Amino acid sequence: MDRVISRRLHPAWLVAAVAFVALVGAAGFRATPSVMLRPLHEEFGWSLGTISAAVSINLLLFGLTAPFAAALMEKLGMRRVVAGALLLVSAGSGLTVFMRASWQLLLCWGVLVGLGTGSMALGFVAIVTNRWFVRRRGLVTGVLTAGGATGQLVFLPLLARLTDAHGWRTAALTVAGAALLVVPLVWWKLRDRPQDVGVTPYGGDAAPVVAVPGSAARNALRSLAVAARTRPFWLLAGGFAICGATTNGLVGTHFIPAAHDHGMAETTAAGLLALVGLFDIAGTVASGWLTDRVDSRLLLGGYYALRGLSLLVLPSLFAAAAHPGMIVFILFYGLDWVATVPPTVALCREYFGASGAVVFGWVFAAHQFGAAIAATSAGLVRDRLGDYDLAWYGAGALALAASLLSLMLLAGKRTRDGGPAGPGIGLAFPGRPVPADIT
């Protein structure tokens, strides 16, 4: 019976399942900032701006680590890098229970967890899908991306209740334990390439394993140097920076404190934010399905425009305590939370070929750079003005600008079949020529 099942189930699906679990485990700590902001402020007297700075370091390192981690996975393998990353997340989360000064928060919450989660960022998703899948690549990208939303869905209500009943230290230790439990599974079942288990990628022929000379850091920087000479890179990076600012940086970090300012219980606000994660699963999987069928440039333009409109109406919903309207916002915004990821990954693969995963790591670094700026800026806005209204309006306007940046990619689109194929970066994927660099 085991032999029959093994013949029916391609190993790529097992690798994707293990990657999904690892991403869920890493998402746990990324869900904690919003439920710990106020408890840390009340216990230590640190301003929201100071605590938000730790969140910003976390988000910034989460992004900056991604391209180097992707290149390191090419050299050392996914299993070693992901297992080490989970250990960093667990250590950083667990050590926060001993902190007494704000610099310790910056070190544990910002540096250690930022490095750990960054090593399992969306560049990891790109490597898994690029190596193991030819068919269903967009769909699998959507499912794996939804792993972060699933982690938020699983952990946010639990962490909010634990923090409310037993304090934030219990919540931090819970996240540390969850990340640690995933390590044995990753070491046991995660495999680097189809050739390691004697199969071809799902839906395609075996691709040659090309040994990339040089160090991982040098290769990551080389990919950035080449990609940065192209117009699509800056349009994708600019749009994704705004994506990070309007999701992780603002809503993911400040939605619960903002709701509390308007009289909503933190556990209720955490439940609403968890619903964002629930709807995000559906939205991201659907986006992956659409990415296999619709031009990714059009998808990004639509996603960012709808997000901008939803953020522009949020202050009025808070002010009116409009709970039915807030549920509509949560549904609408949740479907769009990280739906941008599958088309962005697809465009990096289209424009930059075999180096697409590493280049996407740099695009994702821009995402987290935007998130870091938004996390700190929104905290400062709240400290100075007493509310978050200016932050919501600014984010809505930025999202509309990101829609325009995405649609600008259409102006330089190359014909996929029979059109000119330029050098790109690295090797083209089977059946998908790499368009010429657009400068």
Image: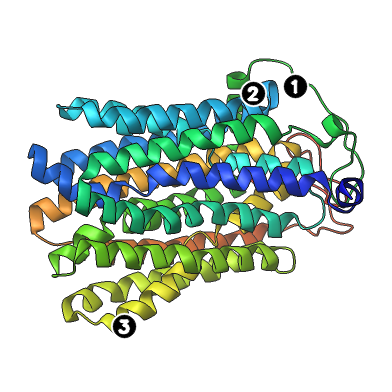
Residue that appears at 27% across and 61% down = 255
Point out the frontmost of discs 3 and 2: 3
Local secondary structure at mark 2: helix
The residue where tag 1 is placed is 212
Q: Earlier in the sequence, mark 3 or mark 1?
A: 1
Q: Nearer the viewer, residue 193 or 174?
A: 174
From what the image shows, is residue 56 above or below residue 241?
Answer: above
Local secondary structure at mark 1: loop
**In the rendered structure, are the residues bearing label 1 and label 2 in contact, judged by CB atoms less than 8 Å apart?**
yes
**Residue sticking out furthest to the front:** 1
Residue that appears at 77% across and 58% down = 136
Q: Earlier in the sequence, mark 3 or mark 2?
A: 2
- 50 horizontally vs 230: left or right: left
Residue that appears at 27% across and 56% down = 161
Image spot of residue 407 (x, y percent): 57, 65
Quadrant location of the C terminus in the rendered image? top right
Q: Earlier in the sequence, mark 1 or mark 2?
A: 1
- 38 horizontally vs 193: left or right: left
Q: CA distance from mark 3 to mark 2?
A: 48 Å
The residue where tag 3 is placed is 325
Colouring mode (rainbow / by chain / secondary structure / one colour): rainbow
- 371 horizontally vs 160: left or right: right
Looking at the rendered structure, the kind of residue marked 3 is Gly
Image spot of residue 117 (x, y percent): 46, 36
Few, some or many residues within 10 Å of mark 3 (<14, 14–19, 20+): some
Q: Which image quadrant for residue 418? A: bottom right
Looking at the rendered structure, the kind of residue marked 2 is Asn
Q: Nearer the viewer, residue 198 or 204?
A: 198
From what the image shows, is residue 207 above or below residue 415?
Answer: above
The residue where tag 2 is placed is 219
